[in-house]
Image (cartoon, rainbow, N blue to C red):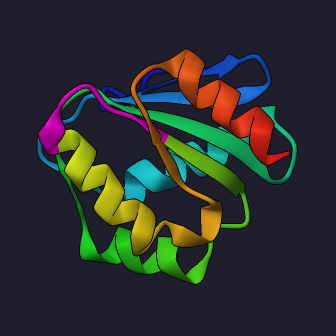
Amino acid sequence: MDTGRIRMENYMGVLYCEAYMSDEFSLRDLESMRAMIRENFSPASDVILKKADSYSVSADAQAVLQKGVKEFRSFVYVVDDKRKKASAEFAATNYMERYNTRVASTKEEAYAMLRKLL
């Protein structure tokens, strides 16, 4: 599935997303991920999200994520540069902390991290 901002697919039983928007990750983007999980995965799913472009996360989306998204169990960001890594690490220790959030360099590394969390 491709929303025009996020590509989503099943990767070995995990929701794999590639966020390629260059503006702001919004509540609408978050809802598209949640809908994909509800339609295609178990009630609480592991998620790998590749930050393919640079974007900010809206304050509304951060607030919802901090309160808790029942569809997310564990979460791993995939990043390919220092700027994206710093952004992902900030998220992991703040509004994404409740999802055992980690940061990886590749999709394969992210998947291995998720398997260790189980």
Q: Is residue 39 visible?
A: no
**Quarter of the image with the N terminus in it:** top right
The residues colored magenta run 77-83
- Image quarter for residue 53? top left
Above or below: residue 74 compared with residue 110? below
- Image quarter for residue 33? top right
Above or below: residue 49 compared with residue 9? below
What residue lies at 45% left-to-right and 20% top-to-bottom? 106
Instruction: Give x and y (percent) for residue 15.
Output: 65, 31
Above or below: residue 50 compared with residue 63? above
Residue 71 colored in magenta in the image: no
**Quarter of the image with the C terminus in it:** top right
- Horizontal relation, residue 4 to residue 114: left or right: left
Q: Is residue 42 visible?
A: yes
In the foreground, 75 or 82: 82
What residue lies at 40% left-to-right and 75% top-to-bottom? 94
What residue lies at 49% left-to-right and 78% top-to-bottom? 66
Instruction: Give x and y (percent) for residue 113.
Output: 65, 35
In the foreground, 36 or 90: 90
In the foreground, 74 or 4: 74
- Horizontal relation, residue 44 to residue 104: left or right: right
